[in-house]
Structures are given as structure tokens and as C-alpha cells.
Image (cartoon, helix red, strand yellow):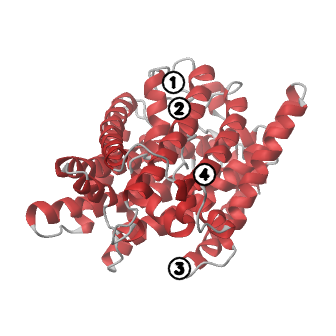
Amino acid sequence: MPPETVPVLADRGATTGYGLRKQVLGPWETLAQSVSAIAPTASPAMTIPLVFALSGNGTWLTYLLATLAMTLVGLVIGCFARRSASPGSLFTYTAESMPGWAACVSAWALLLAYVATASSVAAGFFNYANVLAQAALGRSLSPVMLLVIAVLAAGAMAYRDIKLSAEAMLWMEGASVTCIVAILSLTVWKHGLHFDMAQLSLHGVKPSGIGLGIVLALFSFVGFESATTLGEEARNPLVTIPRAVLQCAVGCGVFFVLSAYAEVVGFRGVHPGLQEVAAPLHALAAMAGVNLLGVLVDIGAMVSLFACTLACITAASRVLLLMAHRGLVPAGLGRTHARNETPHAAVVITAAATFIPPVLLAARGVSGGDIYGWMGALATYGFLTAYALVCVALPLHLRRVETVSPGVLLLSLAAFLAMVLAMAGSVYPIPAAPYSWLPYIYLGYLALGLSWYGLRRT
């Protein structure tokens, strides 16, 4: 049967193979994919100050609640990942149990989520690259040139070798997180080993601030499930992938909670405050008398943001690969490179999609921080949609293949409600423009995806 006439959502790769390099990644390299997609360095450097502006002394609690929500979703994903392994991650899980239109929504939402996150962190990359350029050269470099460097280099690594990409991401993140831990430890030591009662008593914190802050805090976690896109390439995937997803959610969550607590302690009584400083970790390093570490953290933040760009292009290309095998996009995007065994056509498309939005915005004079926030918020809608659909799909899947226990049903319900509440918190109270436009852009994008799905079925 010609590819054009294969029914939509019939997985051609299930019997013929996807052409990816099989079982090349060990447990650490599989974990590196999820860790790099989160970009743990970016949250203390860019996201925690935004959360603090809303949650104040409750920033640590906001991150704790976000950690619990992501742990629930991670447990749900783990239930699937112990039973199924493929390049399509959450899209596959939804397609196995729900109607075709729901699987289509999951696929397009997840693809947008990875690409928009890659665009967001690519903008963060040029933002921190210019922080370093200003310090070293006394001038800023062209944002467009820096975006070309970041996306081309990330795309080339994803095109060339998944094992090389994973190893590079692991070393990049390990080095940058080590520098952050050193600065935050010195900050707490400098202020004395005592509890910050203003934070622990939630002094001046409003429930609405916690609710709005959780939405931003969740962006620190999105992509933690991206190890599931390595179902073909990970060794012993039914064990290593669910373990990597849960380790990433819990481990990064603990890191974010402690970072939030230490940053608020470090900026207690300091002007300008945490939410007003362009490079908070550099400022903390200067206050602790270790300026060199501040420079290293700026470098680490830039490297971490590049690693996240690479991880998101890697994940998005594999989702696009499976979408091609399922008939949702042209079959040519399902091809893999004969020598590299990577989805080279899908990598090129996702890298181009990553590059275009930040370049257009940067050319209009939009700052790297604004692009980071706008594209990150758009990505969050996609992730929350995919997570919510997986929570619905799990009991449906288990009912079809085995018995659904009350515990699994309760877990799925709790995780689904957490995602719905997070989605509601992102649109009400209505945020200022352009954030208020993003839900309409997202819904329009999904409508186009569903329309294309309907045409393919016809």
C-alpha cells in the first residue's frame, strides 16, 4: 500500500522499524535527555526571579507544589513507559488508548511544546551570550548571529549522533549545576546557618500569588518526560526510561526548591531585589566574594540553554518521525539517515521551526528575556495538554489490557486535576498582553492540526 493511503494513526514503524540506532544509550545518557530538556541552570538564572515577583516568600512552596504535580505526572508516564517504548513518547501513549482526534491533539501539542521550548531557550542563550560579551568586549553581539550559531550547532549535533549529543548534554548540565550549587551554598553560609522564618511562615504571601507562580514554576519542569522519545535508542528502555523520568522530576524539583530558598535568603534586604536583577546568580557570587564563580555561572547558564535547545530539537524530531509513521505529516519526514541513524529530515524541519520565531522577534528589537518568557508560556500550553491527555489515557489503556486498580485511577485523576488547575491559572486572572494572546494562538494552532488530520482521514 503506498504511504499516502495508509490510514491515519496506523504505525508503519511498529513492524518495519524506525531506522534509529537501537539500544545505544545507557541509563545516564537517557537521564541526560530529560535533564537537558529541563535546563536546570535556566530556572535559578531566569525563572525563579519571575516566580518570586508573584509568590514572594512563598517561592519555595510554589516550587514544592509544582514538584508534587510533576511527580504525579511522572508516575503516570512511568506506568506507560514500563509497558511501551517508541520514539513518540506521550503521543504514542495517547494513540494507544484514545480516539484518533485526541492522539492528533497530543501529537501537535507535544511538537509545539518542544519546538517552542527550543525557541525560548535559544533566546535565553543569546541573552546570556551578550551578558558575557558586554563583560569581555564592552559591546553586545548580533542576536541573529548568536541564534544562527546556537540552532545550527544544536541541529548539527542532533543530525550527527544521538550518543554524542547525549554525552555532551550530560557534561554540560553537570558542570553548570555544580557552579550554581557552590554559589548558593556560599550564600547560605554567608548569611548564617539558620532558618529563614519569613519564608517558612509565608510572610506576606497571598494564595493568588502562589497560584499564578505555579504556572511559571511548571515551565521549569516541562520537558522532563523527553527521555520517553528515546524508546528505540535507550538500552533496556522499559526500565531506564521510567526511572529517568521520575528521577528527573524529583531530583530537579528538590534542586529548584533549595535554589528558590537560597536565592530569596541571598537577596533579603538587598536593593535591587531578586526580581529586578538581570543576572541574580552573578550578583549572589559577587556578594559572596567569588566573582569568578559568577562568570562561570553565566557561562554555565549559556551552555545549559544551548543543551536545552539540543535536547528539545532531539525530542521534537522523534515526535515528528512518529507522526510521519502515523500518517499525520508527509511520509518523507519519517526517513532516517543511512549512516547516522538519526531522523535527519525531521531534525532539519524542527531546527528551522526553532530558529524562525526568535529571529523574527529579535530582528524587531524584542529582548532575549521577553522572547524566553513568551515562547516558554506558549510551550507550557502544549506540555500541559499532552500531560493531561496521558492522565486520561492511562486508565483507558489499563482497562483494555489488564485490571485498573483504585490506586492507578486515583493517581490519574489527581495528576489530571493538577494539569487542569495549572491551565486555568495560566489564563485567569487574564494576564497582560502579549501573554493574553497566547491561548488564542495556541487554540488556532491546534485547530489547524485537527483540520489537517481531518483532511488526511478523508
Q: Is residue 319 above or below residue 125?
A: above
Q: CA distance from mark 1 to mark 4?
A: 20 Å
Q: Secondary structure at mark 3?
A: loop
Q: CA distance from mark 4 to mark 2?
A: 15 Å
Question: What's the amino acid at mark 4?
Answer: Leu
Q: Is residue 235 at all visible to an observer of this figure? A: yes
**Nearest the eye: 304 or 24:** 304
**Residue at 29%, 53% in the rendered image:** 150
Does 448 sit left or right of 63 as displayed? right
Q: Are marks 2 and 1 in contact (CB under 8 Å)?
A: yes
- The residue at which mark 1 appears reads as 234
Which quadrant would the N terminus be assigned to in this image? top right
- The residue at which mark 2 appears reads as 230
**x then y, percent, for residue 306:** 33, 49
**Nearest the eye: 111 or 46:** 46
Residue 110, label in figure: 4
Q: Are marks 4 and 2 in contact (CB under 8 Å)?
A: no
Which of pointers 4 and 2 lies earlier in the amino acid sequence? 4
Residue 434, label in figure: 3
Which of pointers 1 and 4 lies earlier in the amino acid sequence? 4
Q: CA distance from mark 4 to mark 3?
A: 22 Å
